[in-house]
Image (cartoon, grey):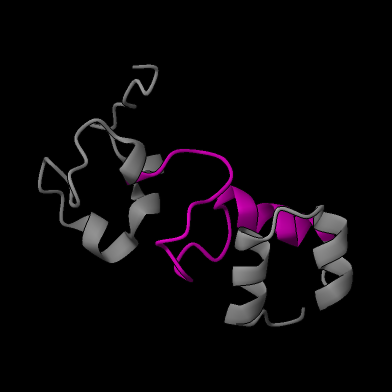
Amino acid sequence: MKRLTADCVRDCLENRVPSKVIAQRHQISIETINRIRRGESHGEVFPELPRWGGRTCRQCIHWCGHCGYGIPEVRHEGPLFARYCSTFQESNSDS
């Protein structure tokens, strides 16, 4: 298994090109790219960058730059902690 660099993870998250393009560029599988983009892999690398799927603390109605409930794990797990959070409530951004 090829060890991914931080630059590769950033490339996966910031570039909205097809996964196939990035996979060829970095010589890794398309599934690896998709897992990074969905937040299933390498969540600790650039946790401030949004993942393409799932929920993040920043989408929570209780988020105000930190967890409104004071859950300390957010500081350690980063904004992807929401996928495990039992208090998560998504805000309505329709207004």
Left or right, residue 64 beside residue 14: left
Which of the 4 image quarters holds residue 30? Answer: bottom right
Compare residues 18 and 85 and report the one nearer the observer: 18
Instruction: Indicate the position of residue 39 as horizontal and vertical percent values.
Output: 54, 52
- Front-lying residue, 25 or 95: 95
Residue at screen point 48% across, 71% down: 45
Q: Quadrant of the C terminus?
A: top left
Quadrant hosting residue 92: top left
Write the residue at 51% across / 38% down: 54
Is residue 27 placed above or below 49 in the rendered structure?
below
Query: Quarter-wise, where is residue 31 in the image?
Result: bottom right
Q: Magenta stretch? A: 30-57
| x and y percentages locating residue 16 in the rendered image | 71, 53
Q: Position of residue 87 (x, y in %)?
A: 23, 32
Residue 47 forms part of the magenta stretch: yes
Q: In the rendered picture of this protein, how many numbered marks are placed on residues?
A: 0
The residue under the point 44% across, 38% down is 55
Q: Main secondary structure of the magenta part?
A: loop
The residue lying furthest to the front in this view is 95
Going by the picture, which residue comes out furthest to the top? 95
- 48 within the magenta span: yes
Examine the rendered structure and indicate whether residue 65 appears above or below residue 14: above
- Can you say whether 83 is above or below 13 in the image? above
Q: Position of residue 89 (x, y in %)?
A: 29, 26
Q: Quadrant of the N terminus?
A: bottom right
For the residue pair 18 and 39, the one nearer the viewer reads as: 18
Would you say 8 lies left or right of 60 here?
right
